[in-house]
Image (cartoon, rainbow, N blue to C red):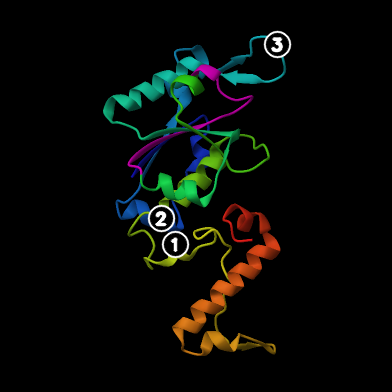
Amino acid sequence: MRIDIITVLPELLESPFNHSIMKRAKAKGLLEVYLHNLRDHTPYKQGQVDDYQFGGGAGMVMMPEPLAILIELLQKDRKYDEVIYMTPDGLLYDQKTANTLSLKENIIIICGHYKGIDERIRQHFVTREISIGDYVLSGGELAAAVVVDSIGRLLPGVLNDETSALFDSFQDGLLAPPVYTRPADFRGWRVPEILMSGDPKKVDEWRHEESLKRTADRRPGLMKEDGQE
């Protein structure tokens, strides 16, 4: 998979993709992440990429021309399955969307800044708009890092345990059950006996029941969405 990220702050994204699972994905050749500084592709002086908004009002808007130039430059070399714009008014990101995007081959992600990008770019280039939550960040870089990380870990061969991602929270519409490790008795707090029973069927049943309980307690809306009331 190849992901091209358009940003005015590429240095902000260098660290997240050079450590841990993302570093492993890149080292194995399973994920390519390219950062493109939008200021390198503007026809305006001094790297200008934003201007005042028509109609007045506070805040600058990212100009259409630099974005169009860079997007079309990238599209000359390959076909992109998605051109994603990270924005607070996009659709709320979830595991289902991450699963869908992990099946794509080439993706462009646009990181917004200021009051956002010119609407004409959204209308004529963007194929999907994503929000990672109902709050506003200083820019789209951190949100883009979240999306890339959630996609990258799903690629076959990235995780050491191939089944690990399948049992993450939200994969089955439920939160993950509690997990325990050694020692079995810590300060008198014991691990549930069922987990040490050696009976995989009973362990699976216990985990499912705990997932249902945890979801009902912490995120009951998930159960309503999945028809599990």
Is tag 1's residue or tag 3's residue first in the polypeptide sequence?
3
For badge 2, the amino acid type reads Leu
- Which residue shows up at 68% across the image and 20% down it? 59
- Which residue shows up at 59% across the image and 28% down it? 113
* Magenta-colored span: 104-120
Tell me the tag on residue 56: 3
Quarter of the image with the N terminus in it: top left
- Which residue shows up at 64% across the image and 37% down it? 137
Which type of secondary structure does the marked residue at label 2 adopt?
A: loop
Q: Quick check: 201 above or below 120? A: below
Is tag 3's residue or tag 2's residue first in the polypeptide sequence?
3
Q: Nearer the viewer, residue 15 or 143?
A: 143
* Residue to which mark 2 is pinned: 154
Residue 190: quadrant of the picture: bottom right
Is tag 2's residue or tag 1's residue first in the polypeptide sequence?
2
- Quote the CA–CA distance across marks 1 and 3: 48 Å
